[in-house]
Image (spheres, helix red, strand yellow):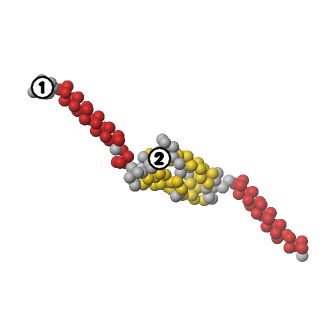
């Protein structure tokens, strides 16, 4: 028998050692336990410009796609992808998958409202074409 076997200091040291081992195992197993995650930093809901930039962070992933198209991700998991919106309601779906086959998706809804000046320009050019087209037969008649 060793004289220090029952000492209080030895028990505390062993508890601290095993807590460190358990903490490190938990840290390393996060990918297995939690799976992929997606966070979008660009918080857009209604825009007046058809060109937007989708920015975010994806953790513990092997691939990331936006509306079915693979997008590039930095080593730290950051992504920055341009997107051209259609007028009205737009849904952008991000899908991340990890090396274990698990996937997580995030859907962003953005409403694109055209500027009043661009709408007026289109209406003016359309009405000009209509007037020209309707006045041509009257002149030829």
Which of the 4 image quadrants contains residue 19? top left
Q: Within 10 angstroms of label 2, few (less than 14), some, or many (20 or more) residues?
A: many
Q: Position of residue 22 (x, y in %)?
A: 28, 38
Front of the two marks 1 and 2: 1
Residue at image coords 58%, 55%: 111
Q: If the image is split into quadrants, where does the C terminus sit?
A: bottom right
SS for dot 1: loop
Observer able to see residue 106: no
Return the mark for residue 137: none
Front residue of this view, candidates 15 and 86: 15
Whether tag 1 and tag 2 are in contact, CB under 8 A, the answer is no
Residue most extreme to the bottom = 141
Front residue of this view, candidates 124 and 104: 104
Query: In the displayed structure, does residue 2 sit left or right of residue 56?
Result: left
Query: In the displayed structure, does residue 117 sit left or right of residue 35?
Result: right
Query: In the displayed structure, does residue 11 sit left or right of residue 76?
Result: left
Residue at image coords 59%, 52%: 83
Task: Tell which circle, 1 or 2, labels the residue nearer the N-terminal end.
Answer: 1
Q: If the image is split into quadrants, where does the N terminus sit?
A: top left
Which of the 4 image quadrants contains residue 101? bottom left
Q: Position of residue 60 (x, y in %)?
A: 42, 46
Residue at image coords 56%, 52%: 45
Observer able to see residue 115: yes
Return the mark for residue 2: 1
SS for dot 2: strand
Q: Position of residue 16 (x, y in %)?
A: 25, 31
The residue pinned by badge 2 equals 58
Q: Position of residue 125 (x, y in %)?
A: 77, 60
Q: CA distance from mark 1 to mark 2?
A: 53 Å
Residue at image coords 12%, 25%: 2
């Amino acid at each position: 028998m060793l004289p220090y076997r029952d000492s209080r200091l030895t028990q505390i040291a062993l508890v601290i050692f095993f807590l460190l081992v358990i903490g490190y195992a938990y840290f390393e197993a996060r990918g297995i336990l939690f799976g992929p995650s997606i966070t979008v930093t660009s918080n857009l809901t209604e825009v007046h410009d058809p060109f937007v930039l989708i920015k975010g962070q994806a953790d513990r992933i092997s691939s990331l796609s936006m509306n079915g198209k693979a997008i590039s991700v930095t080593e730290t998991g950051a992504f920055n992808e341009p997107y051209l919106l259609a007028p009205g309601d737009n849904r952008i779906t991000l899908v991340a998958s990890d090396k274990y086959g698990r996937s997580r998706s995030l859907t962003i809804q953005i409403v694109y409202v055209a500027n009043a000046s661009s709408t007026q320009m289109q209406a003016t050019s359309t009405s000009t074409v209509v007037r020209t087209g309707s006045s041509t037969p009257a002149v030829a008649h």
